[in-house]
Image: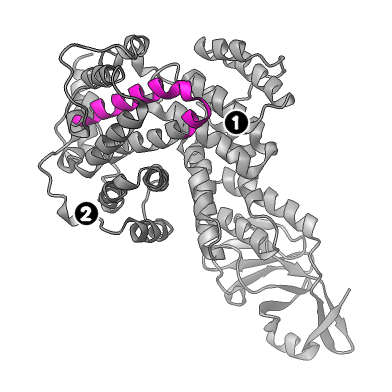
């Protein structure tokens, strides 16, 4: 132990409280009936100086209360009685009329374990400040701050009742924003992931995954997903992990399963790519919790190709490469206003004459044009049918889906027809929410490179109240940036579309619209 002389015992006895400084730390000395104590002077909650706090107790016990938010710490045991974090204490002794403290060097592994335990408590309590604090402690100790994300994924995986959510879908993009940036920016991005996972595990109930393992069989895995048989699919994926399948194999298998239907409005494919991206970044330890949550999401996912609007999807996929008579020329402007059914038919008809090198850019251009020309007034409207509810986020999915599809098709080119048709589904559906006459001159971007850099910086101080919105901001911005890199001629349009979306005021709650729609709905019961 390395004892440090910090004050005269007589001075502490006279004052009762003293603040001393050592290597940048403020350390509070307390002379109480229960003994002499030394702690950090800042409350772990919001940093209020504990010298201004209150002491209570007797010769057996001493409680220090932070008067800012009434957090209470038992100095004799070190326990936090009221509050959500521990108070750092230091060994202290009186020697020859002096007060000495021991700034004990941290046992790094013990501190790491304590931090991750504290993080789980913060996740359970939905305490975003403490989540951020615990990640900051990892950074301060020069430990891997991604351990916080790994622990959060393990904690949340079986608490996500219906599987993968936008919290996981956006995590790879937040991690990309955390690379090669100052510590503060890195912590912002990590904090978004942690708080969103905590928020999505809403009721804190655990929904355990089926136990056991079955030998990997890709056909049986696909059949289990098709049958929405989660236990069988979970056991089979564990067999795949035991082999183990490579990341590219998982991308191929999951993408194929995701595209067997127009599932969950395209989220199935987006999440398939993002989940494997996370495994690549965080390591194999997170593979099972992430893949189990994803399989659960696939088994619960809605299948929009069963709805009238998208019901022709399977037929158009079977007829891929067949032409229709009187086919017009190919162009993005032809895709802007059609229904999902007519847009799929047009894309399938084009496939008889053109390859994806021609069809893909046209779809991508149409998707970006729609986002740029969104009918914002409709998103704010009170009077509309429940089935017609839509908002900015709906229009972003075409671009995030396109980016995921591009990555999936790079491994499995045979998936291109399904990807192009499903992108047509997005464009056809979104055509109802477009204002073609919208004045978009203000949003035009002449220098996409500068826009991407500035928009990335803006994301790290977005100020949005709901995680679902900040997640879409991150996912869509980075997807558009990647798409622009593959289609440089569309970069100005993509940047302009993102310029409008990232700066748009978004109505986060529709209280009156909801009330009107629910009154109308129950009147028909």
Residue 415 within the magenta-colored segment of the rendering: yes
Side (left or right) of 82 relative to 97: left
Q: CA distance from mark 2 to mark 1?
A: 38 Å
Few, some or many residues within 10 Å of mark 1 (<14, 14–19, 20+): some
Q: Quadrant of the C terminus?
A: top left
Few, some or many residues within 10 Å of mark 2 (<14, 14–19, 20+): some
Q: Quadrant of the N terminus?
A: bottom right
Instruction: State the SS at label 2.
Output: helix
On the question of residue 127 being in view, the answer is: no
Q: Nearer the viewer, mark 2 or mark 1?
A: 1
Q: Which residue is mark 2?
A: 443
Q: Quadrant of residue 428?
A: top left
- Magenta range is 407-431
Q: Position of residue 326 (x, y in %)?
A: 15, 15
Q: Position of residue 180 (x, y in %)?
A: 55, 60
Q: Which residue is mark 1?
A: 248
Instruction: State the SS at label 1.
Output: helix
Q: Classify 263 as above or below 393.
A: above
Which is nearer the eye, 508 or 407? 407
**What main secondary structure does the magenta stretch of the protein show?**
helix
**Residue ID at (82%, 82%):** 4
């Amino acid at each position: 132990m390395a004892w440090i002389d910090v004050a005269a015992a007589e001075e502490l006895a006279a004052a009762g409280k003293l603040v001393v400084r050592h290597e940048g730390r403020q350390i509070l000395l307390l002379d109480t009936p229960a003994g002499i104590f030394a702690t950090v002077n800042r409350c772990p909650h919001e940093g209020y100086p504990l010298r201004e706090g209150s002491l209570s107790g007797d010769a057996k016990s001493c409680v220090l209360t932070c008067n800012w938010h009434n957090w209470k710490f038992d100095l004799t045991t070190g326990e936090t009685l009221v509050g959500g974090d521990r108070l750092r204490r230091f060994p202290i002794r009186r020697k020859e009329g002096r007060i000495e403290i021991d700034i004990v060097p941290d046992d790094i592994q013990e501190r790491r374990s304590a931090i991750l335990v504290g993080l789980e408590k913060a996740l359970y309590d939905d305490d975003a400040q403490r989540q951020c604090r615990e990640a900051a402690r990892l950074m301060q100790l020069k430990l891997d701050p991604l351990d916080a994300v790994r622990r959060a994924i393990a904690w949340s995986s079986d608490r996500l009742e219906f599987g993968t959510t936008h919290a996981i879908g956006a995590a790879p993009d937040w991690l990309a924003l955390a690379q090669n940036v100052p510590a503060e920016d890195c912590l912002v991005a990590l904090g978004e992931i942690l708080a969103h996972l905590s928020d999505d595990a809403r009721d804190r109930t655990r929904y355990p995954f089926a136990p056991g393992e079955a030998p990997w069989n890709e056909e049986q895995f696909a059949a289990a997903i098709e049958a929405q048989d989660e236990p069988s699919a979970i056991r089979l994926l564990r067999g795949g992990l035991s082999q183990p399948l490579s990341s590219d194999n998982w991308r191929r298998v999951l993408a194929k399963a995701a595209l067997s239907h127009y599932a969950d409005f395209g989220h199935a494919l987006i999440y398939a790519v993002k989940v494997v991206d996370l495994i690549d970044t965080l390591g194999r330890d997170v593979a099972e919790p992430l893949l189990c949550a994803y399989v659960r999401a696939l088994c619960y996912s809605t299948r929009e190709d069963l709805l009238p609007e998208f019901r022709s999807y399977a037929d158009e996929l079977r007829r891929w490469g067949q032409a229709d008579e009187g086919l017009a020329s190919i162009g993005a402007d032809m895709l802007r206003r059609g229904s999902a059914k007519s847009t799929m038919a047009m894309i399938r008809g084009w496939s008889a004459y053109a390859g994806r090198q021609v069809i893909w850019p046209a779809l991508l251009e149409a998707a970006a044009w729609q986002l740029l020309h969104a009918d914002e007034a409709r998103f704010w409207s009170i009077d509309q049918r429940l089935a017609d509810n839509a908002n900015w986020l709906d229009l972003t999915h075409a671009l995030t889906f396109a980016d995921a599809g591009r990555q999936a098709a790079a491994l499995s080119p045979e998936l291109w027809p399904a990807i192009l048709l499903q992108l047509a589904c997005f464009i056809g559906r979104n055509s109802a929410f477009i204002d073609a006459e919208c004045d978009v001159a203000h949003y035009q971007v002449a220098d996409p490179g500068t826009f991407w850099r500035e928009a990335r910086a803006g994301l790290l101080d977005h100020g949005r109240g709901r995680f679902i919105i900040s997640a879409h901001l991150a996912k869509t911005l980075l997807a558009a940036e990647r798409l622009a890199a593959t289609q440089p001629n569309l970069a100005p349009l993509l940047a302009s579309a993102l310029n409008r979306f990232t700066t748009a005021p978004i109505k986060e709650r529709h209280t009156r619209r909801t009330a009107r729609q629910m009154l109308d709905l129950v009147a028909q019961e």
